[in-house]
Structures are given as C-alpha cells and as structure tokens.
Amino acid sequence: MSILVTGAAGFIGSKVCELLAKSGEDVVGIDNINNYYDVKVKKYRLDGLKKLKNIKFYKVDIEIKKDIEKILNEYKCKAIINLAARAGVRYSMENPFTYVSTNIMGTLNLLDIARENKIKKFILASTSSLYAGQKMPFVESLAVNTPISPYAASKKGAEAMCYSYHYLYGIDVSVLRYFTVYGPAGRPDMSVIRFIKWIDEEKPIELFGDGLQTRDFTYVEDIAIGTIKALKKVGFEVVNLGGNKPYKLSYMINLIEKNLNKLANYDYKPFCKADIVATWANIDKANKLLQWTPKVSLEQGIRKTVDWYLENKYWFKNVTL
Ligand SMILES: NC(=O)c1ccc[n+]([C@@H]2O[C@H](COP(=O)([O-])OP(=O)(O)OC[C@H]3O[C@@H](n4cnc5c(N)ncnc54)[C@H](O)[C@@H]3O)[C@@H](O)[C@H]2O)c1
C-alpha cells in the first residue's frame, strides 16, 4: 500500500515525500508543475526525489479527477496527503478563481477518490492565514470566519469539505494549519529565500510594510515530520504546526545579514491588505495528539537555509523571483 502525496514537486511536498521514502514507505507523488514560481526550483526538488527508489512521480493535475483515478488504478493507497495548492496570499487577489478551482475543487476530487477507493486517511495542508483578526497565540478552537484573502477563504472551503467527507463517509482527516514554512529549496515567492538572494546579490529587498510584522516561522523538516505524524488515526482534527516563537521580519533579516556578512538595502512597499499582521501558533494540541514539537530554532534554520543557498548559488542565481 502506497501513500499518495500531492504537490510532490513543491517545497513541503518534496520534503514529506523524501522523509516518507527514507522511512521505508512506498510513495506516489503527483504535481502539475505549474509556473506560478520558477519551475527550475521544482525540477531541482524532483531530481532529488528521483534518487530515492521507493518514490514514483507523475505529472498530474488534481483538478482533473480522471487523471488521478488512473494513478489509483495502478497503485493501492492507504492515505492521501494533499499538499498541492495555490499557496501565495498576494497572487490570490489577482487570480481568485484559480484558488477556488485548485484548493477547493482539487481537494474535493481527492476526497471523492478517497471515498471511491476506500482510502481511510486524508491529510489537508491548511494555513495560519485563517486566524486573521483573532487573539494570539492562535488556538485551533478559535472561529475562523473572517478570511482576509481568497487564499485563506479557499482553505476554509477545503477544510469544510474535509469535515463533510469525514462525517458522511468516515474518512479519518487531519487538517494541518502550517505557520510560515521556510528552509532549503524554499519557495522563491516567500520572504526568506527572496531576502537571502537579494541581500547576497546586493539588490534592494522588497519589503511589504515596515518589517515589524511578526511571523511564527517553522523549519520545513519540522513541518514534514509533523505531517507524517499526522497520518495516525484521529477522527477529524485541526492541528496547528508552528514554531511557537513569533519573530519580527526585521529580526529574520538581521540573521540573514549576519550569515551572509552583508547588509540589506530596502525597497519599501505598502503593506498588503490580504496579508496577516502577526502569527503565533499555540501548539499544545500538536504536542499532545501527535507528540510533535519543532526542533529547529530560527537561528539554526536560517543558517541551514543560507548554507543551502550558497551551495546552490551556481544555478539558483538564474531563478526568477
Ligand atoms: N509554505 C508555507 O509557509 C505554507 C503555510 C501554510 C500552508 N501551506 C500549504 O502547504 C501546502 C504546500 O505549500 P508549499 O509551500 O510547499 O507550496 P508550493 O507551491 O511549493 O507547493 C505546492 C505544489 O502544488 C503544485 N500544484 C498546484 N496546483 C496543482 C494542481 N492543480 N495539481 C497538481 N499540483 C498542483 C505546485 O506545482 C507546487 O509544486 C499548500 O497547500 C499550502 O497552501 C504552506
């Protein structure tokens, strides 16, 4: 029995596939390899996965149900981990329709395939963005009724659909709300990787707002470990996976400066209305239910990410941000 991982060429998906395969699981990864950000980064991650023998990869779009069904005809799966998504907050203002079709319709396709194929376990990647307007630290029991971006709204739709399929068909679901994930081979549309590249290339960094907004940064390997732990039977649970220590963006920038031994120049942009001002995860539930705590501090994580960047600069310099 295999585990189907969607978004396998993505930042988090590729790490989840790698850790699952290294733990001896058979993994079937799918991704449509879209060009929302530079596909060179997706190809690099897939090249890494190709070295592991118990991973099969297929270029499949989760919006096309019959194509996913073909995969399920070939491989018996015991779980689906749905990490494929349109994930950028700001771009969701430009193209909200794609967010609904991928994040909600795509999730529905996968849930329906789980029902048809009697796949008992489903994991959905959701987001801390849903907590906009709530009191920190964010706890899972808070109401999330004011999504401030089409991205967050689409994840709320996906979460709700997961609950319906759990209630009606008994599918065991873990909804994981991730908090600002960063690390090696990270997304070139997110601040950490962009800032590293810009500071190293001595180009001004595009900063939305004043840098005083805070994020509960979480290292990618910690996120992947938590995601795999969430394969356990839980019924239906929403669980935060976050660093539990919010930091100002300006502190993250200082760490990059120290590691590169270069100073940032700034290109200030207005704060984007769709962005949340601050995030901070309460992770008591992840602790109790999944025995999960993040292990990598922001200081260690930024160092590892900068080291990765310096080793990969020979090709990463050609990545478009
Ligand atoms: N990175 C973060 O900080 C963060 C925070 C909260 C939630 N999340 C969620 O975690 C998941 C993974 O995020 P990520 O940071 O790895 O993003 P990512 O963009 O690197 O990975 C998503 C992958 O899904 C693929 N994909 C998109 N639409 C698809 C479709 N229709 N069919 C098949 N594949 C498709 C993309 O090509 C991409 O490789 C997403 O669901 C995202 O919303 C991420």
Image (spheres, rainbow, N blue to C red):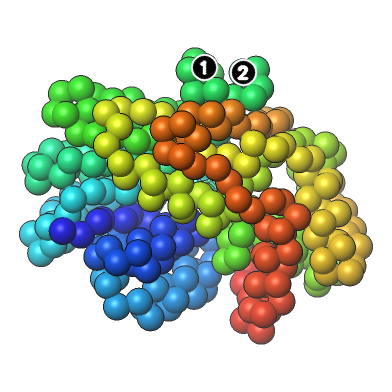
Give the quarter of the figure containing the N terminus: bottom left
Crowding near pointer 2: few (<14 within 10 Å), some, many (20+)?
some
Q: Are marks 2 and 1 in contact (CB under 8 Å)?
A: yes
Q: Is residue 262 left or right of residue 134?
A: right
Q: Residue at x 24, y 34 (%)?
A: 172
Q: Quadrant of residue 270?
A: top right
Whether residue 41 is visible, yes or no, is yes
Give the Cα separation between the discs numbered 2 and 1: 7 Å
Q: Position of residue 70 (x, y in %)?
A: 12, 60
Which numbered disc, 2 or 1, marks the residue that appears first in the sequence?
Answer: 2
Crowding near pointer 1: few (<14 within 10 Å), some, many (20+)?
few
Q: Position of residue 199 (x, y in %)?
A: 82, 65
Q: Is residue 302 left or right of residue 223?
A: right
- Amino acid type at circle 2 is Gln
Q: Secondary structure at mark 2?
A: loop
Residue position for label 2: 134
Residue position for label 1: 142
Q: Quadrant of residue 162?
A: top left
Q: Residue at x 30, y 32 (%)?
A: 234
Of the pair 240 and 204, the residue shown nearer to us: 240
Of the pair 98 and 151, the residue shown nearer to us: 151
Q: Position of residue 2 (x, y in %)?
A: 20, 59
Q: Residue at x 71, y 30 (%)?
A: 277
Q: Is residue 173 above or below residue 196?
A: above
Whether residue 126 is visible, yes or no, is no
The mark found on residue 245 in the picture is: none
